[in-house]
Amino acid sequence: MYCPKCGDKIEPNEKFCNKCGYLLVNEKNDIKVLTSNKVPIYIVGSLLIICILFLVLIIIKNPNSAFRFFQNGDTSYTSSSKKGKYSTVIITDNVYTGMKIENSKDAYNLIAKDSTDQKSKCPKEILEVEQQIIKYYKISAVNLCEMDVDFAKEVSNVFKVVYEEFPTIKGSITNLSLINSNKVENSGIIAQFMPVFQFATSDDVTTYPWVIKTQIQLVSQFFLNEERLKSNTKRSSDAGWFPKNSNELSPVAHELGHYISFLTMIKHHNTKSILMINENNANNLYTIIDDFSKGEYSLSLLTEAYNNYKRDVGTNLTLDEWRGEISEYALAKDEEGKYIYDETIAEAFHDVYLNRDNANVASRYIVNVLKEKLGVKV
């Protein structure tokens, strides 16, 4: 068993992590909302342990879903209840315990309520943009509270363009939100796709399932400082780290690429949704997350696209050389020096979003495979 905060190994029956002091057990059984900067989540049975291991595996050990600048560093995040110049008051990691979720409608309503309860001081104009995103793209919770209204509309338009081309992808993202990063200068994280976050738990998982959020998170230090975001994405694009013509909306398109790739993987494993988890489908979720982290399915998608290209055009390039033509970030590696294949897919999607028919040919072949897997006309 590992600490959900720092990842350090902990012994059974420990109440606190010996390394960081994280509270592992909450002895109260009443229904409450918890936040990571107040009282952490308590452990309820083996399924919660599995989900925590998912998060450790994906976000800490192999953060293959984060869109970065050309720099290395810490990827840790924290919520904040105080709003700075480039910070949000929105808390993205609230956790509800002891919940009795009867169906998916209950799950979506709880996610929406958690979001709505934090909007009392958000400007009316932003609330209107958020409601449009919720309505048209079936995202249960949208929190862009401090964002410039015109920029928020541009972010919404990214979803419009992508969802018009991929109409079958609606409904699986539960949250789109600003998030604070406590070490943004060193981390280089602009945005991230978080496929699994345990949001609500029941005391009896055999009767009532637990709720999983699937999120796209936009780091406030960039998305509340548009000039900084423009400058850095342009610099990285000019250097070849990102695809040509990358701009301040590129991180959103990139994370949607991760999301679409994840949906193809869910479909591959014969799963319709990971919103609600119980003892019957926990193993299937573990298989999906393990596959996403290892990159085996992502590699299979790339190999299929590469073979299609070789069949149609012919090439002397290796697979790695071929996908490296998209951008340098398409060849990103994890801390162990292993390729993160899903970054290639996200960069290919990003490239096609930006450049359409002028995108790199490898990008176009990869996106066509995504479309085929999701039943979208190529």
Image (cartoon, rainbow, N blue to C red):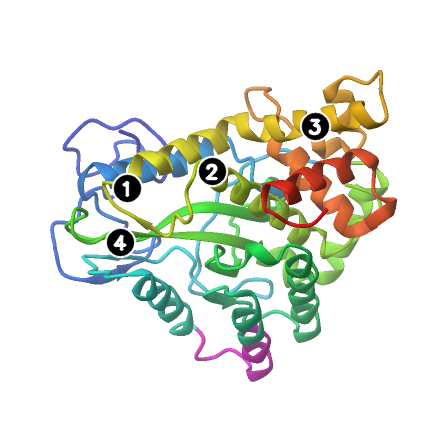
Give the structural element (helix, strand or loop) at label 1: loop
Disc 4 target residue: 39
Q: Can the viewer see residue 245 in this picture? A: no
Picture residue at 42% right of the left edge, 61% below the top: 91
Q: Residues within 10 Å of mark 1 (few under 14, many from 20)?
A: some
- CA separation, marks 2 and 4? 21 Å
Picture residue at 81% right of the left edge, 30% below the top: 325
Q: Residues within 10 Å of mark 3 (few under 14, many from 20)?
A: many
Which label lies toward us, 4 or 3? Answer: 3
The quarter of the displayed image where residue 313 is located: top right
Vertical position of residue 372 compared to residue 310: above or below: below
- CA separation, marks 3 and 2? 19 Å
Disc 2 target residue: 59
- CA separation, marks 3 and 1? 35 Å
Query: What amino acid type is highlighted by mark number 4?
Result: Val
Query: What amino acid type is highlighted by mark number 3?
Result: Leu
- CA separation, marks 2 and 1? 18 Å
Disc 1 target residue: 22
Vertical position of residue 59 compared to residue 218: above or below: above
- Start and end of the magenta stretch? 119-130
- CA separation, marks 1 and 4? 9 Å
Mark earlier in primary sequence (4, 3): 4
Give the structural element (helix, strand or loop) at label 3: helix
| Residue 315 within the segment the image draws in magenta | no
Picture residue at 55% right of the left edge, 83% below the top: 124
